[in-house]
Amino acid sequence: MTSRRGALIVLEGVDKAGKTTQCKKLVQTLLESGRPAEMMRFPERSTKIGQLISSYLENKSNLEDHTVHLLFSANRWELVPLMKEKLEQGITLVVDRYAFSGVAFTSAKPGFTLDWCMKPDVGLPKPDLVMFLKVNPAEAARRGHFGTERYENCAFQNIVLQRFEELMMDSAVNWQVIDASRNIEDVHEEIKNYSQKVASKAVTEPIGHLWT
Ligand code: DGP
């Protein structure tokens, strides 16, 4: 007999799109409906690799662009055993950013192709659902704390948005675009509906592999 694994649900978007708020609310709602659920986030800044990334994002250190790209990817890979363990235990994972941010942010830098950026993340656990919280970067910039970390500038975020749009053309990934310019509750309602559908589908299939 195959036991039901948890679903792998990812929220993506430009900076300040509301991903963290929505991830927390979604975990809460899933738990209230009796479904084991936990939040994860990338970058996960608590590991040794995560600390290098965090210091880079806070502009406390500089790293070469290819190097930092590989560190972000390594940070996802180092959490894969834990992700698989939790999914196999039937826990639904709600993940704040994933490989799509990895590709969108690095490929927004000059000289990086989407293809090169995708390579290190090929084979990661494939999300059952990726919700893209769409908001105009100029509007996101008006939300709290924007501008404190590397990458938090409007011109760069506009290119990031274009890169996400290119990634969303891949029909092998289950993308759903959410209008995140609405109020928190309306956005949550839509996210909840998509997530509950995915989570209650008999998730008896083994987890897939990204971009293979
Ligand atoms: P936060 O989600 O607030 O912890 O911010 C993380 C920042 O790092 C944000 O500006 C997006 C960016 N980012 C996230 N993942 C990656 C990645 O894999 N590669 C690159 N280059 N940037 C990333």
Image (cartoon, rainbow, N blue to C red):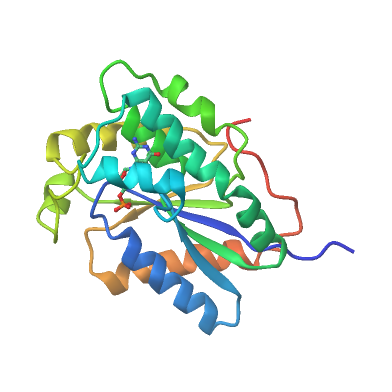
**Tag count in the figure?**
0
Residue 7 vs residue 76, the one in the foreground: 76
Please identify the quadrant where the N terminus is shown: bottom right
Q: What residue occupies the far top of the structure in this picture?
A: 111
- The picture quadrant where one finds residue 180 is bottom left
Can you say whether 206 is above or below 29 in the image?
above
Residue 25 rendering spot, x and y as whole percentages? 39, 73
Quadrant hosting ligand 1 = top left
Kindly identify the residue that appears in the image at 32 percent across and 67 percent down: 21
Kindly identify the residue that appears in the image at 40 percent across and 65 percent down: 23
Residue 91: tell me if it is visible. Answer: yes
Residue 82 rendering spot, x and y as whole percentages? 62, 56
Kindly identify the residue that appears in the image at 49 percent across and 33 percent down: 170
In the image: residue 58, left or right of residue 210 = left
Residue 48 rendering spot, x and y as whole percentages? 45, 47
Please identify the quadrant where the C terminus is shown: top right
Residue 86 vs residue 25, the one in the foreground: 86
Kindly identify the residue that appears in the image at 35 percent across and 42 percent down: 53
Residue 114 vs residue 200, the one in the foreground: 114
Can you say whether 17 is above or below 195 in the image?
above
Residue 44 vs residue 119, the one in the foreground: 44
Residue 123 rendering spot, x and y as whole percentages? 62, 35
